[in-house]
Amino acid sequence: MPDLELQLREDRMLRDAARALVLADIAHLKRELDPDSPPGPDMTSRARDLADDTRDYVAGHRCQLGTVIAALVAAIALWIFREPLAAMVREMFADDEESDDEAAHDSAEQADDTDRSPDEPEIPAETQA
């Protein structure tokens, strides 16, 4: 029982600490977005800094980004055309199965042909039942 009480006390402390962090973040965000707050780094200057950092990163890593963009375009194209591509794959496998069935049918006919005696006349396949 003491272990459960200790665990409950620790869980409550963690919950209270997390709640305090969330409330502090909300208060900070309200202060930042309040038009009457003292001037500080506003959202536009931060967005401008982020855009500058992004531009610098892109300038330094063009080859890597080109590969990523090409892979992204290919993934989007595959996603858009997934149903026609799946139909094509199904047709390919269906053709393989049909050719396997035809080969099995042909080999069965050949086996039937070998069961006949040499004196027996050959009957066309259309007339056989």
Image (cartoon, helix red, strand yellow):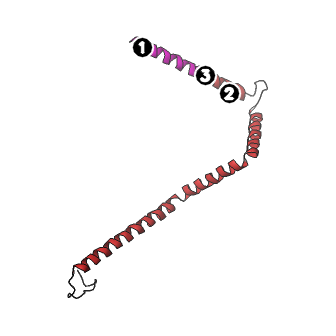
Give how far apart the Cα atoms at labels 1 and 2 are.
Answer: 39 Å
* Between 118 and 107, the one nearer to me in the picture: 118
- Mark 1 vs mark 2: which is more N-terminal? 1
Labels 3 & 1 near each other (Cβ < 8 A): no
Residue, x 75% and y 39% (percent of image)? 53
Q: Label 1 is placed on what type of residue?
A: Asp
Q: Nearer the viewer, residue 64 or 12?
A: 64
Horizontal arrangement in the rendering, residue 124 relative to residue 69 (left or right): left
**Residue visible at 57% across and 19% down?**
17
Would residue 7 be counted in the magenta stretch? yes
Image position, residue 14 (x, y; %): 53, 19
Percent x, y of residue 58 = 73, 45
Question: How dense is the environment of label 1, judged by Cα within 10 Å: few (below 14), some, or many (20 and up)?
Answer: few
Q: Secondary structure at mark 1?
A: helix
What residue did someone put label 1 on?
A: 3
Mark 1 or mark 2, which is nearer to you? Answer: 1
The residue that label 3 is drawn on is 21
The extreme right residue here reads 39
Circle 2: residue type:
Leu
Image spot of residue 122 (x, y percent): 25, 87
The mark nearer the N terminus, 2 or 3, is 3
Where residue 97 sits, quadrant-wise, is: bottom left
Decide if residue 105 is on the left or right side of residue 21.
Answer: left
Return the residue at label 2: 29
Q: Secondary structure at mark 3?
A: helix
Span shown in magenta = 1-23
Main SS type for the magenta part?
Answer: helix
Real-space CA distance between mark 3 and mark 1, rounded to the nearest whole angstrom:
27 Å
Is the C-beta separation of discs 1 and 2 under 8 Å? Answer: no
Quarter containing the N terminus: top left
Among the two numbered marks 3 and 1 on one chain, the one whose residue lies closer to the N terminus: 1
